[in-house]
Image (spheres, rainbow, N blue to C red):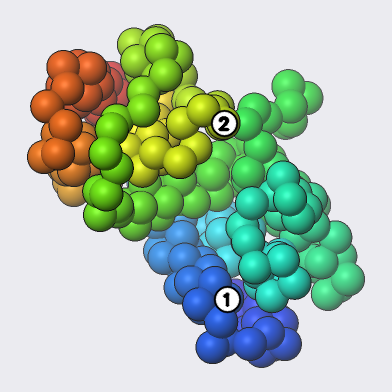
Amino acid sequence: MEEALKIFNNYYLNFDSSLSGVQRKYDHTLRVVEYAKRIAKSLNLNDDDYELACKCALFHDISRFKQWQEYKTFDDSVSFDHGDKGCEILKELGINDEIILISTKLHNKYKLPDDLDERTKMFVNITRDADKLDIMIFLDRVFEDNELILPDEVLDSFENHRMLKNNAEAWSSQGYHVLRALAFMFDMKYKESLKILKDLDLANYKCNLILNKFDDERIKQIKDICNKYIDERISD
């Protein structure tokens, strides 16, 4: 892990850390590594696999520095797919471990390919869970919206335990972004990830951010759905 950290930090030093986006993604990466450690421990991985899970988490967002410095955005649709670009960068840095490369490439995809072997899928899913956890936890909003934009598919996604896809109609709504991140829980693969959400009382906290401004029955429904889902996954 020491050599991986050296490679990561040396690459990071190529970018201007005074840029808020660059520093933000550096901090995000270190938090994702900590979540990956907790998930990996819960799976009782051997020492080598535990370290490999940490390396996958460490490198998953390596392209974000370049993305922010060149485009001043983290929107892949107007810059580049940061998973694909990250895989290219790692190869340029001499990292050839297929599991690290695939985990980086696939960590941001809506759906995983069906042909992944179980071992590779495990590392990809540890990375994806850890990444989603940090996004969910650190995405806070100070609500300045004058209305709550909630397309019909939002409640439908929660009722059917599905992640939300991007919706252009709702993109300007802060509440929509909080709910979109909250729906990440339906793609989480490990019980430990749901335990972290439970420990933080995250479903209540996130929904209450919205309910404190908008007394909307749909948000109350979503809160109940999330809490029930978390409890059932943990006790399963």
* Residue 139 relative to residue 14: left or right: left
* Residue 155 relative to residue 163: left or right: left
Disc 2 versus disc 1: distance between alpha carbons? 26 Å
Return the disc, 2 or 1, that comes first in the chain's sequence: 1
Quadrant assignment, res 43: top left
Q: What SS does tag 2 mark?
A: helix
Residue at numbered disc 1: 22
Residue at numbered disc 2: 168
The percent coordinates of residue 24 (x first, y second) are 48, 72
Q: Residues within 10 Å of mark 1 (few under 14, many from 20)?
A: many
| Closest to the observer, 155 or 56 | 155
Q: Residue furthest front?
A: 146
Quadrant assignment, res 51: bottom right
The percent coordinates of residue 52 (x first, y second) are 61, 59
| Closest to the observer, 72 or 183 | 72
Q: Residue at x 16, y 17 (%)?
A: 217
Q: Residue at x 64, y 51 (%)?
A: 75
